[in-house]
Amino acid sequence: MPDRDLLIGRLPKCELHIHIEGSLEPEMVFALAQRNNIRLPWDSVEALRRAYAFGSLQDFLDVYYVGMSVLVTEQDFYDLAFAYLRRAHADNVVHVEMFFDPQGHTSRGIAFDTVVNGLSRACAEAREALGIRASLIMCFLRHLDEDDAQRTLDAALAHRDRIVGVGLDSSEHGNPPEKFARVFGRARDAGFQLFAHAGEEGPPAYVWQALDVLGVARIDHGVRAMEDDALVARLARDRVPLTVCPLSNVRLRVVPDLAHHPLRHMLQKDLAVTVNSDDPAYFGGYVNDNFSAVARALDLSPAEIVALARTSFSAAMMSEEERTRALAGFDAAVREAEGG
Ligand SMILES: Nc1ncnc2[nH]cnc12
Ligand SMILES: [Zn+2]
């Protein structure tokens, strides 16, 4: 086996937890602010970077929503998504399920169509130019009310062919999944796949609700599920995928440092863990950086690294035919890595 970072780079992988607005690098924030004549509360890229010292999820979200205010035109959304897909491709990501936050834009007067047109054009062109597959998952902002989410779902129905699923993100404390039970029921009836952030900062009860009230197919983060043995047993029994984001968890103080990250324990409990970047521009790294940092801190073996990347394919939304083909490519890449 080659060394850890070489192996990580050689493994094809899926990224299943990326907020596209969280890939907005500070340089791009300033370039788009200039292009669109937007005034920012920071006077330089360095000042913005200094604002990235977060004490909690809410601290981050306060900066994240201001950062995304520079996105105005369809071209802005296209440029953002294409830049991310190019970067992900460099990390050997072959399949992306991309979150976006329409309410962060429609609340500023940007049309839903502008957002979806720009993002979906980037996905289509990246497929052509780079061979990377990408689809869109629209997240509801859970700090907003149910009616706002219902109106957002109404807008999404007109784009049913370009949005594959719905998710739930933003401030977790005090905004349990059950607040959106009816919205998710409608989304399910409309044929959307269902996802939710749960157990990032919030308690295990929110993970139970995401599973049993919303009926989600995957849990985003889910690290606090480890506090509840019965929940761990349920997640393991049903092989519910968990999209874990190690660098995010450190930056948002969910864990004190990577050496204390529960990922190894999650693997020992037979949970279907994947590694992802969450908001790479804000948390110090893209998907390979997340693999590399957590593998080093927890001294993961090559077999464990391979297993994590392989799980990203079983956890992805693909037809069984696509999955079989993708896994064959994955296994071939592992054999090649083992050979040299
Ligand atoms: N890590 C995260 N948790 C909840 N909402 C988010 N929106 C963007 N990143 C998020
Ligand atoms: Zn997230």
Image (tube, rainbow, N blue to C red):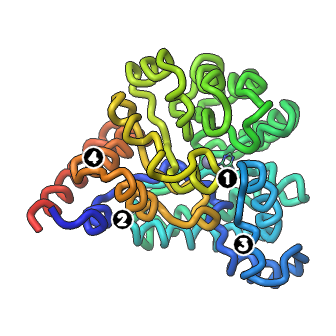
Say if mark 3 contacts mark 2, CB within 8 Å.
no
Residue that carries the numbered disc 3 in the rendered image = 76
* Residue 79 place in picture, x, y as percent: 64, 73
What is the quadrant of residue 95 in the picture? Answer: bottom left
Residue that carries the numbered disc 1 in the rendered image = 100
| Relative height, residue 249 to residue 84 (above, below) | above
Of badges 2 and 4, nearer the viewer stands 4
* Residue 245 place in picture, x, y as percent: 52, 50
Q: Earlier in the sequence, mark 3 or mark 2?
A: 3
Secondary structure category for the residue under label 3: helix
Residue that carries the numbered disc 4 in the rendered image = 304
* Residue 242 place in picture, x, y as percent: 48, 37
Q: Earlier in the sequence, mark 3 or mark 1?
A: 3
Residue that carries the numbered disc 2 in the rendered image = 92
Of badges 3 and 4, nearer the viewer stands 4
Answer left or right for 142 relative to 328: right
Of badges 3 and 2, nearer the viewer stands 2
Q: Nearer the viewer, residue 22 or 140?
A: 22
Mark 4 surroundings within 10 Å by alpha-carbon count, few (fewer than 14), some (14 through 19), many (20 or more)? some
Distance from the alpha carbon under mark 3 to that under mark 2 = 25 Å
